[in-house]
Image (cartoon, helix red, strand yellow):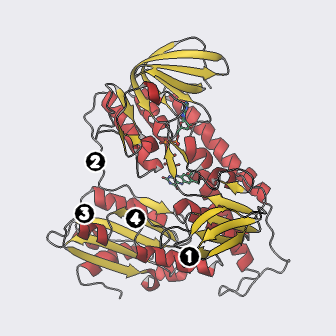
Amino acid sequence: MNRKKGSQSCDVLVLGAGPGGYAAAIRAGQAGLKVVIVEGEKAGGTCLNVGCIPSKALIHAASYFQKVKACEQDNPFGISLGVGAATIDLSKTIDWKNGIVSRLNKGVEGLLKKAGVLLITGWGRMLDGKTCEVSGTDGPMLIHADHVILATGSVVTPLPSLPFGGKVISSTEALALTQVPDKLVVVGGGYIGLELGTAFAKFGAEVHVVEFADHILPHYDREIGKVVMQSLKSLGVTVSTGAAAKHLSEDGSGLVVGLADRSEVTLPADKILVTVGRKPRLDGWGADSLYLTMRDGFIAINDKCQTSMTDVYAIGDVTGEPMLAHRAIAQGELVADILAGKPRRFDPVSIPAICFTDPEVVSAGVSPDEATAAGHELMVGEFPFAANGKAMAGAAETGFVRVVARKDNHLVLGIQAVGKGVAELSAAFGLALEMGARLEDIAATIHAHPTQGEALQEAALGALGHPLHI
Ligand code: FAD
């Protein structure tokens, strides 16, 4: 890792080396700009260290364990295990997950180095719009920059009545547990809570999800939520919707929850995982000494990711929803391109959102309700995986693909899917939307057989009124 004492001046200073910050730094470095990136923890940010990657590693291990366990029981594949019950040593799983994270940390550091970027490890504090003081292990250092990119990301939101500590944990601690809790209560039925809740249920925990809204996955449409709900039930996960987590019971053994019918119940819990959202990281880096305009609690930016201050840009979670790694990366690349003199503006037709539950959920563009609310007359086609040969052959018949298009010109406005492995279809969905596909474009594209992707073609054919396989 590069580290130098004293002061530095550069063309671009990036504060925070999460997906947004490191993407901006690499791209700017590749363009020949002199770039310094400051990171208080490890390169890769939330996503790589305590977010996207470790959670997907745990989800994968949990599914693997579940499949092995399935071989102990009657299954339709004729596979059986004759060597006793499957067991899991979660500490080994965590070691494996940590190994992946550490390889990726090194990978990001290597990419920064290759692009000629100076990575400084330490906590940065902006003194003004062009100067940052870094307090690293080698003592304080000043960095002067012509341009600043703020990429400080986000932090978990605690519940005031249920502060983190003891058995009350955040996703960060959940991803480091070395023992499967017998009873896990998950507060928050959004994507992070359900991904981790599903993983721990597969590891063998008794999981109870408490969601304040009247349905799980409040950011997705209800039809999708219903499919996930069904599968949670079959995994043995209990879900209470319209329920409010209150506080630890007096003896500390469980969580007091107010239910939809106004009664109160105490859910016994070895761990209580609170996943009620994330908030922009605005503390500790000198935001108060800058003149940044805020919008809904986030740093306000325009379509070039410029803040209200000249030469100060902001990207990623600190700038608003959707708080997703690929949005941060896209914004980071965009700002670097602008600083390198390219005309760019941020106007994605879709930022696909994925929930890695079982089945997975993908949503790109708008749902039928959102399109209707925007005043469009619609053509909607939906194709069930139950009628897709590959899905049947892969025991993945749950779910569907849905295409939403304008009635007047058949322009595709949104594509949603719920089903096993549909996360990998998100690239096709995003491409169709970015390329301005019409229903006929998708319908006329020859889709390889047998694949679950054929359901996309069939959904488009369905919207046009002539599906083939249903
Ligand atoms: P961050 O990744 O938060 O990075 C900000 C960095 O800035 C951090 O490394 C921090 O240490 C550093 N920093 C902050 N202040 C300072 C300072 N003063 N000095 C120096 N450094 C500083 N998104 C997806 O797209 N897909 C997923 O599957 C997904 N899964 C997730 C699962 C979990 C459990 C969680 C918690 C999040 C998940 N996310 C996922 C969200 C994703 O992690 C974030 O959207 C993404 O990391 C945002 O990137 P960022 O660069 O804006 O900020």
* Residue type at the position of mark 4: Ser
* Residue type at the position of mark 2: Asp
283 vs 6, nearest the viewer: 283
Q: Classify the position of the N terminus by image quarter.
A: top right
Which of the marked residues, 3 or 4, is nearer the chain's N terminus?
4
Q: What residue would you read off at disc 4?
A: 363
Q: What residue would you read off at disc 3?
A: 437
Question: From this viewpoint, which residue is outermost toward the left?
Answer: 408
| Crowdedness near tag 1: few (<14), some (14–19) or many (≥20) residues, C-alpha within 10 Å | few
Q: Which dot, 3 or 2, sits closer to the camera?
A: 2
* Cα distance in 3D space between marks 3 and 4: 16 Å
- In the rendered structure, are the residues bearing label 3 and label 1 in contact, judged by CB atoms less than 8 Å apart? no
* Residue type at the position of mark 1: Arg
Q: State the image coordinates of residue 406 (x, y, percent, origin top left).
A: 20, 69
- In the rendered structure, are the residues bearing label 4 and label 2 in contact, judged by CB atoms less than 8 Å apart? no
Q: What residue would you read off at disc 2?
A: 347
Q: Which dot, 3 or 1, sits closer to the camera?
A: 1
